[in-house]
Image: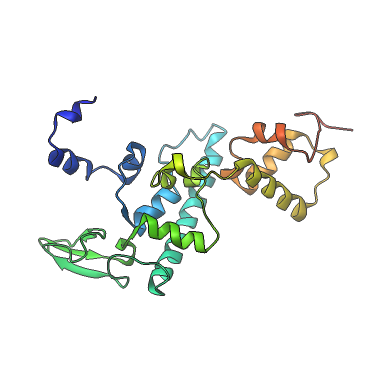
Amino acid sequence: MGSESFLSDNSRKQAESKFSVKRKAKLGKLEDYLSIQKIMHLMFPVTPDRPKRSSGDYKVWRKENFENLSYRKGFKKDLIKACAEDKLKYEGNIKGWKYSGENPFPLAGVGKKRPNRGSRFICRSSDCSIHKDEFKRFYQAEKKWPLDSALPSCGDLAKWYDNKNMPRINKNQKRNNGFESWMREKNPCLKEMSWDEIHKELKERDSQLWGHGFDGWKKQQSYYKGKPGKRKG
């Protein structure tokens, strides 16, 4: 039992309401309604801790953050469009809204306080919130469910749900699909490549999918039985 147990329920909830969405996800305290902005941040996280430029991890860190920032924009645009077309139920005004005092949409995001305007707030489309069951329903209809909590790109958002009861996608099946797609597009001569060279190309193609777990996938795959790290020939 942590020291927070000494707080009253109201005091604890008030304190936790100020936590970042990433921290809430880690603690398993995400609300049933999340704003489009928060969903976007959980789906495509950006890592603030920058490795040293001299390390080999720097290029991977920079590429992953750049990619996720780009994906965020597209994902947010898709959600807003689905809400505007009444394909996705939401709380708020998809065109944005302003208020002073109490938010007219208490389940939506609070927005940003307008400078020098006292208690007046301005909310954007991305402050509209979506219930987790509605989010699930929408992506089930789109044939894009379940979330794969094994992947970094979905790990935080997957905590919005009860992962124990949530079916898991076989992550190595995704790598198989990615490998086959790379083979079709590049038509590489595998016999002339080492495992290190194959891994490098796959990671450059999709750093989130191939940035980790390659060795485990390599042991179970049936595409190529070359000697790891050595040229065949």
- Identified at 66% across, 31% down, the residue is 215
Q: Position of residue 35 (x, y in %)?
A: 32, 57
Question: Visible in this render: residue 173?
Answer: yes
In this view, 40 is above or below 231: below
102 displayed left or right of 78: left
Quadrant, the N terminus: top left
In this view, 215 is above or below 203: above
Q: Position of residue 200 (x, y in %)?
A: 68, 39
The one of 90 and 233 positioned closer to us in this rendering: 90
- Identified at 38% across, 54% down, the residue is 39
Question: Visible in this render: residue 73?
Answer: no
The one of 84 and 97 positioned closer to us in this rendering: 84
Q: Position of residue 91 (x, y in %)?
A: 29, 65
> Which quarter of the figure has residue 12?
top left
- Identified at 63% across, 47% down, the residue is 174
Q: Position of residue 88 (x, y in %)?
A: 40, 67
